[in-house]
Amino acid sequence: AATADGGLNLILTDDKLHTLTVVSETLVDLNAAALDNSLSVLDGSAANGGLLLDLSSATDADEATAANQVITVTTGSGNDSIANFLGQVQTSTITLGAGNDTFDMAASDFHTGHTLPTITIDAGAGNDTIDLSDSTTLVTEGTISVTLGAGTDEIEVEGTATSQTGVTVTDFTV
């Protein structure tokens, strides 16, 4: 089905989708129903029309060992939006390409079942918004590293951590 601006709204039914590569010059909308919990790698580096991703079910669930669970998401030069990211894997790498991108952490305990998980976000160039405020236990264990690129970026961090390991933000002007 087409999106309002002529892009593509995909619904995928494969329940063992480990790797997805998206190549498009128009907007691609992958909502929560589109991606199952087997997803480990989403390569949208050639999706230059923008990606709308709901990652609420992306947990690399087919990897039985929690310490080996990995999520890697790369987007292209369009205006991308990643919503409802759970971060409930050992290692997460989110690389947003150029464009005015948004990243939204879901309301969850991002460390569930993992020892000192690591989330790395590279916002790329553009006027980006990184929202880490939805999780009240966001940084009780592990680390979150955010690199902001060229452009006017916003980052929001909240939480009630008792043993804060930390959120590190680099490449920004105050």
Image: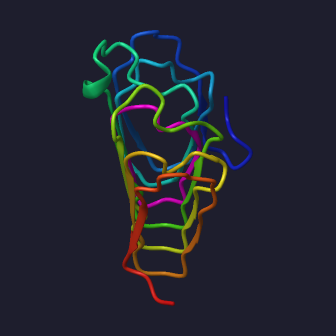
- The residue at 35%/41% (across/down) is 117
Q: Is residue 69 left or right of residue 54?
A: left
Q: Is residue 21 above or below residue 36?
A: below
Q: Position of residue 57 (x, y in %)?
A: 54, 25
- The residue at 51%/90% (across/down) is 174
Q: Residue furthest right?
A: 4
Q: Position of residue 1 (x, y in %)?
A: 67, 28
Q: Is residue 66 left or right of residue 127?
A: left
The stretch in magenta equals 74-91
Examine the rendering and report whether any part of residue 111 can be seen.
Answer: yes
Q: Quadrant location of residue 168?
A: bottom left
- The residue at 58%/22% (across/down) is 11
**Magenta highlight on residue 70:** no
- The residue at 51%/53% (across/down) is 49
Along the line of sight, the residue nearer the viewer: 20 or 161: 161
Q: Position of residue 169 (x, y in %)?
A: 41, 71
Q: Position of residue 109 (x, y in %)?
A: 56, 36
Q: Quadrant location of residue 10?
A: top right
